[in-house]
Amino acid sequence: MRHRLPLLFLVGFAAVLTAGWIGFPRALYVTESQPFNFNHRLHKDQAAQKCVDCHSGGAAAALATCAGCHPEPVGTTQDEKILVASYIKPGREIVWKSSARQPVNVRFPHGPHVDKAKIACDKCHGAHGESTTVGLYQEDRISGYSRGALTLSMSACEDCHRQKGVEAGCLGCHK
């Protein structure tokens, strides 16, 4: 029996590690759906829209942009019917769950990055213009932040600043 103890310990340890590797993310993150699906590629290619057409000026401006083309459903998708019936006609703001929200101690003004440095949206936010679905939202139950691949890390920002030769210092980005 004594000669089996190290083997039993290793098997048990491997089982616990495997269970934790698989189970911990499921226990740590809550998964939610977005209000409806949105096809960025369709709007970019067929309607020639740019990111700033919807993503500047706040939620009311974005809804007005939607209403400009969709006072009634243009296509046949269930998602567009939800958009028109649940948001455009009643004038209700669409509350998207953001995968790009930064921690409360981070200050990120888009203006200097987009207007002055001419950084394209997809450099930080990914190629949303090519996406045909919105995807599920995952939120860390402890921190309240999203798990999204769109959330930038401090090292990604530092690398970009270093490549561009821009010194921001700690207080340039942090409150």
Image (cartoon, rainbow, N blue to C red):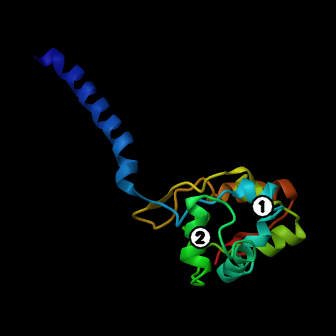
Q: Secondary structure at mark 1?
A: helix
How many numbered marks are there?
A: 2
Q: How much space separates mark 1 and mark 2, taking CA atoms?
A: 24 Å
Considering the image in quadrants, where does the N terminus appear? top left
Looking at marks 1 and 2 on the same chain, the residue that comes earlier in the sequence is marked by 2
Q: Position of residue 22 (x, y in %)?
A: 37, 41
Q: Position of residue 118 (x, y in %)?
A: 88, 64
Rendered view: 81 above or below 67? above
Q: Position of residue 29 (x, y in %)?
A: 41, 56
Q: Is residue 7 left or right of residue 149?
A: left
The label number, if any, that marks residue 83 in the structure image: 2
Q: Is residue 117 left or right of residue 154?
A: right
Q: Residues within 10 Å of mark 2 (few under 14, many from 20)?
A: many
- In this rendered view, identify the residue nearer to me: 135 or 146: 135
The label number, if any, that marks residue 121 in the structure image: 1
Rendered view: 88 above or below 126? below
Q: Quadrant of residue 44?
A: bottom right
Residue that sits furthest to the left in the current view: 1
Q: Residue at x 55, y 54 (%)?
A: 135
Q: Residue at x 58, y 67 (%)?
A: 81
Q: Which amino acid, mark 1? A: Cys
Q: Which amino acid, mark 2? A: Leu
The reply to whether callout 1 and callout 2 are in contact (CB within 8 Å) is no
Q: Position of residue 148 (x, y in %)?
A: 56, 56
Considering the image in quadrants, where does the C terminus appear? bottom right
Say if residue 41 shows up in the picture.
yes
Q: Quadrant of residue 153?
A: bottom right
- In this rendered view, identify the residue nearer to me: 168 or 24: 24
Nearest to viewer (mark 1 / mark 2): 2
